[in-house]
């Protein structure tokens, strides 16, 4: 049997072999990129939840690209395009259903990145005035004067604004 005959026999399976090769390469490359992003983000001042969000978003985008490449290689786009189109509508419906959660998370990212206020600062927002004791991706916890802890959604803080009364220094805190 000649090499040309062997290639002719392998021709029907070539698309599947390419798809497997794309999957293997994607698995290796995405693993390296994930480790690189983790190392890079660990040197920044971003909070851990923001670092995880950015890393996961990058990895999901890379896997989406790999899966789309596999589907194109296997000529599945004609079959799956209507399903992908329907998933866009489902995604839009889910996004509308969780828009407040998404708004809080997005505002939390901006509040955490901008660092306008930190833990220990005196702040006034909405109708509350007190000391910030925790800032997460979705919520900010403020301890008001009577000792009550108020949990405020970051989206409302960002949209209503805030006043920073004074920054607590280490000598004031002790």
Image (cartoon, rainbow, N blue to C red):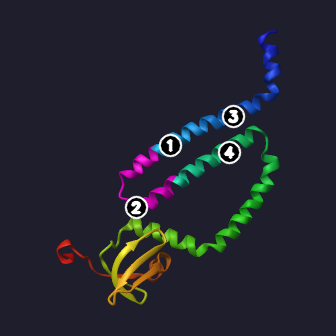
Circle 4 crowding by C-alpha within 10 Å: few under 14, some 14–19, many from 20: some
Evaluate if marks 4 and 3 touch, with contact meaning CB atoms under 8 Å apart.
no
Mark 2 and mark 4 lie on one chain; the one further toward the N terminus is: 2
The residue under label 3 is 20
Evaluate if marks 3 and 1 touch, with contact meaning CB atoms under 8 Å apart.
no
Give the CA distance from mark 2 to mark 4: 30 Å
Q: Could you tell me which residue is drawn at 40 percent across and 48 percent down?
A: 40
Evaluate if marks 3 and 2 touch, with contact meaning CB atoms under 8 Å apart.
no
In the rendered structure, does residue 38 fall within the stretch colored magenta? yes
- Position of the C terminus by quadrant: bottom left
Give the CA distance from mark 4 to mark 1: 17 Å
* Residue 88 vertical position relative to residue 32 in the rendered view, above or below: below
Q: Could you tell me which residue is drawn at 54 percent across and 51 percent down?
A: 58
- Number of marks present in the image shown: 4
In terms of image quadrants, where is residue 129? bottom left
- Position of the N terminus by quadrant: top right
Where is residue 29? Give x, y as percent: 55, 38
Q: Which residues are magenta?
A: 36-55
What element does badge 2 sit on? loop
Examine the residues drawn in magenta and state their main secondary structure.
Answer: helix
Evaluate if marks 2 and 1 touch, with contact meaning CB atoms under 8 Å apart.
no
The residue under label 4 is 67
What element does badge 1 sit on? helix
The residue under label 2 is 47
Residue 33: which numbered mark, if any?
1
Circle 1 crowding by C-alpha within 10 Å: few under 14, some 14–19, many from 20: some
């Amino acid at each position: 049997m000649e090499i040309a005959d062997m290639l002719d026999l392998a021709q029907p399976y070539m698309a599947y072999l390419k798809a497997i090769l794309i999957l293997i390469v994607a698995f290796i490359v995405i693993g390296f990129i994930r480790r690189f992003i983790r190392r890079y983000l660990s040197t920044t001042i971003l909070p851990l939840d923001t670092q995880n969000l950015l890393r996961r978003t990058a990895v999901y985008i890379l896997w989406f690209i790999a899966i789309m490449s596999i589907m194109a290689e296997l000529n599945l786009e004609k079959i799956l395009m209507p399903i992908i189109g329907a998933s866009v509508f489902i995604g839009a419906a889910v996004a509308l259903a969780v828009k407040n959660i998404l708004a809080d998370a997005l505002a939390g990212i901006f509040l955490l990145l901008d660092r306008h206020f930190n833990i220990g600062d005196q702040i006034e927002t909405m109708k509350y005035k007190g000391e910030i004791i925790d800032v997460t991706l979705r919520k900010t916890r403020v301890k008001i004067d009577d000792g009550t802890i108020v949990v405020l959604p970051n989206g409302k803080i960002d949209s209503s604004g805030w006043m920073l009364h004074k920054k607590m220094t280490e000598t004031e805190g002790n």
